[in-house]
Structure formats: C-alpha cells, structure tokens
C-alpha cells in the first residue's frame, strides 16, 4: 500500500495544478460550467487506477 501512495504522490508533484489549469485554458474544449477542475478529474482518475492495481495484486497473490 505504501508503494502505491508514494507513486501517486510523486505523480501529483510532477503534474502541478497550475500547469494543468493553464493547459486547460489554452487547449480545453467543452463545457466550461463543470464543477471540478481538470486537475481534480485527473487526480481522481489516477487514484482509481491505483486502486484497481491494488485489487489486481491482491487477487494475484491469493490465487498463487
């Protein structure tokens, strides 16, 4: 678990919020009335992927 959190926080440091927001302002398309920023959406998606990886590892450990 600690390894996954470390990777997640490292990715969060590599992708600073102000850079993601400036890229969204420059290249963004679609509805501007969204309730969450692109940064929050990206971090939520990365966290979901992290959780899926943890579940996969648990299943693989149990089956072996």
Image: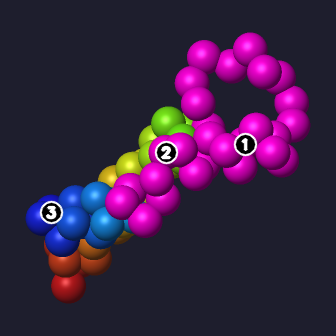
The image's mark for residue 17 is: 2
Write down the quadrant of residue 25 in the picture: top right
Going by the image, does 31 lie left or right of 19?
right
Going by the image, does 37 lie left or right of 29?
left
Q: Where is residue 61? Give x, y as percent.
A: 19, 77
Quadrant in which the N terminus appears: bottom left
Going by the image, does 15 lie left or right of 7?
right
Quadrant in which the C terminus appears: bottom left
Q: Is residue 27 magenta?
A: yes
Q: Residue at x 60, y 17 (%)?
A: 35
Going by the image, does 38 lie left or right of 44?
right
What separation in Å lies between label 1 and label 2 (alpha carbons)?
11 Å
- Circle 3 residue: 1
User: In the rendered structure, which disc, 1 or 2, sits on the residue that comes first in sequence?
Assistant: 2
Q: Is residue 24 magenta?
A: yes
Task: Tell me if I can see residue 46 in this picture.
Answer: no
Q: Residue 16, relative to residue 10: is it above or below?
A: above
What separation in Å lies between label 1 and label 3 (alpha carbons)?
32 Å
Q: Which residues are magenta?
A: 12-38
Find numbered disc 2 in the image and state the secondary structure of the residue it sits on.
helix
Q: Nearer the viewer, residue 15 or 56?
A: 15
Task: Tell me if I can see residue 6 in this picture.
Answer: yes
Q: Nearer the viewer, residue 37 or 4?
A: 37
Q: Nearer the viewer, mark 1 or mark 3?
A: 1
- Circle 1 residue: 24
The crowding category of the residue bearing disc 2, from other C-alpha atoms within 10 Å (few below 14, some 14 to 19, many at least 20), is some
Cβ atoms at labels 1 and 2 below 8 Å apart: no
């Amino acid at each position: 678990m600690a390894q996954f959190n470390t990777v997640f926080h490292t990715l969060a440091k590599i992708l600073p919020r102000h850079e993601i927001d400036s890229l969204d302002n420059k290249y963004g398309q679609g509805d501007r009335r969204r309730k969450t920023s692109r940064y929050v959406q990206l971090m939520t998606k990365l966290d979901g992927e992290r959780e899926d990886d943890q579940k996969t590892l648990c299943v693989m450990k149990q089956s072996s």
